[in-house]
Image: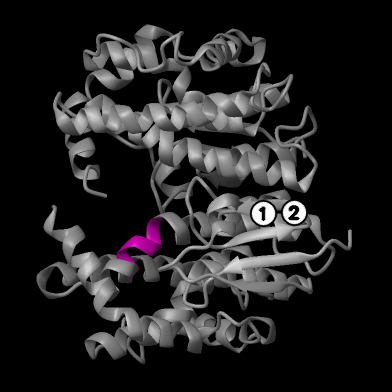
Amino acid sequence: MNEPVKLLGSFGSPFTHRAEAALRLKGVAYEFIQEDLGNKSELLLRHNPVHKKVPLLLHGDRAVAESLVIVEYVDEAFQGPPLLPSDPLARAAARFWAQFAVDRCLRTLFKALWTPDGEARRGFVAETKENLALMEAQLEGRRFFGGDEIGYLDIAASGLAWLTVLEELAGVERSMIGEEEFPALCRWRGEYTSHEAVKACLPSRDQIVAFYAGMKERLVLLAKSMQKK
Amino acid sequence: MAEPVKLIGAVGSPFTHRAEAALRLKGVPYELVHEDLDNKSELLLRLNPLNKTVPVLLHGDRAICESLVIVQYVDEAFDGPPLLPTDPYDRATTARFWAHFMEHKCSMPFWMALWSGGERRKGFVEEARENLALLEEHLQVHGKRFLAGDAVGYPDLAGSYIPLMLDMFEELSGTSLMGDDEYPAMRRWVKEYNSDEAVKSCVTNKKQLAAYFRVKKDKYKMMVKAMLKQY
């Protein structure tokens, strides 16, 4: 299918990044349409009425929503290097660890970042580090979670790659992903952010700051509401 | 591959049901290893050290955890009727999108509406019904028997807690979540799901789940009460 591909997204959002990384890695030509999240376009609302969120992939007149669903779609609908392995067990492992990365690393990390200093925050940091240690072990000395090349799990966990900028914004003194504790994850981060295909769609520090700057208050409130779940 | 398949699960677990139904639909012979969730076995803790929950699928010596990961594994590792459509777009938009919706948007309000009480319950019931309305629209527009086609598939399994536990609403609170003249497509879907031969033949079927939750209802009510107090 040679129909045009458009990606509605918000540059600076880790969810949008996942979709873009998948397109770049697969070598799919696309047009990026920046959405103003404070003033959502008619196009977005029409094609993603259930969630009204970015990213949203438009392939011809077909709309695909949910960042990781988009990644799997891109993997299946286009030719190019595979993002998921072909062996069912390896696929199950990638999906399992992607869910773990999202629920137990990125989510707790989010709470750790945006909860004000105190016992609760210390708890989230400890929990994040405990879970990151398991991700660290999953790397097993490989370049990427996917092996020699970036795969589904790397893309799912890619939010970890610009953690340092967020930590700066949140006023954290020492990064949660320190070199000593997480040498493999630090190396992975370097590999991921310097990869040819990914580099082209990685937001700059300024773009990440711009995306999050206006949101700090809202993020603190959101972290608070997530606390007891 | 003719290696033995075991499903470690609990009879009262809707998550175990997802995995069991997948095996039945695919036509894979398996042994159900019963777990007592109040007294977890050494085997379970060894195979699923991270989450210590059921279900866990054992295919030969490979262990797969997380119910929806198991469903996809069963679809991909064994021959049999497909649990997801073959077209990439249908896979993404009907199967995976609605499975994600069932798991991440729909399940929490449904669960909270079931076990909570008083004023808080009203909010959860409203949210649950909003989600039902979205599903209703999808079913009506899509026009198929099930969420992604004319056979039970991935998103139906993801949302199977609804057909399995819907009657409990009435049992527990005296009112149904869906009135007799409401959500016709959803009520048809519930009926279709519960009448499916493979689904009905599961050990973790509707009757068993209802029996389990009837016994444990005070425990779940208390759990939810405690959760809500913290807000």
Q: Position of residue B77 (x, y in %)?
A: 79, 56
| Residue appearing at x 60%, y 82% in the figure | B203
Chain letter of disc 2 in the image:
B
Q: Which residue is mark 2?
A: B87
Do the residues at pointers 1 and 2 share their chain? yes
Q: Is residue A220 left or right of residue B87?
A: left
Q: Residue furthest front?
A: B42
Residue B118 vertical position relative to residue A134 in the rendered view, above or below: below
Q: Residue at x 68, y 19 (%)?
A: A142
Which of the pair A81/B78 is nearer the observer?
B78
Mark 2 and mark 1 in contact (Cβ < 8 Å)?
A: yes
Q: Quadrant of the N terminus of chain B?
A: bottom right
Three-letter code for the amino acid on which mark 2 is drawn = Asp
B118 and A199: which is toward the camera: B118
Picture quarter containing residue A136?
A: top right
Please determine whether, in this image, residue B27 is positioned above or below residue A23. Answer: below
Residue segment shown in magenta: B105-110
**Left or right: where does residue A202 sit relative to residue B89?**
left
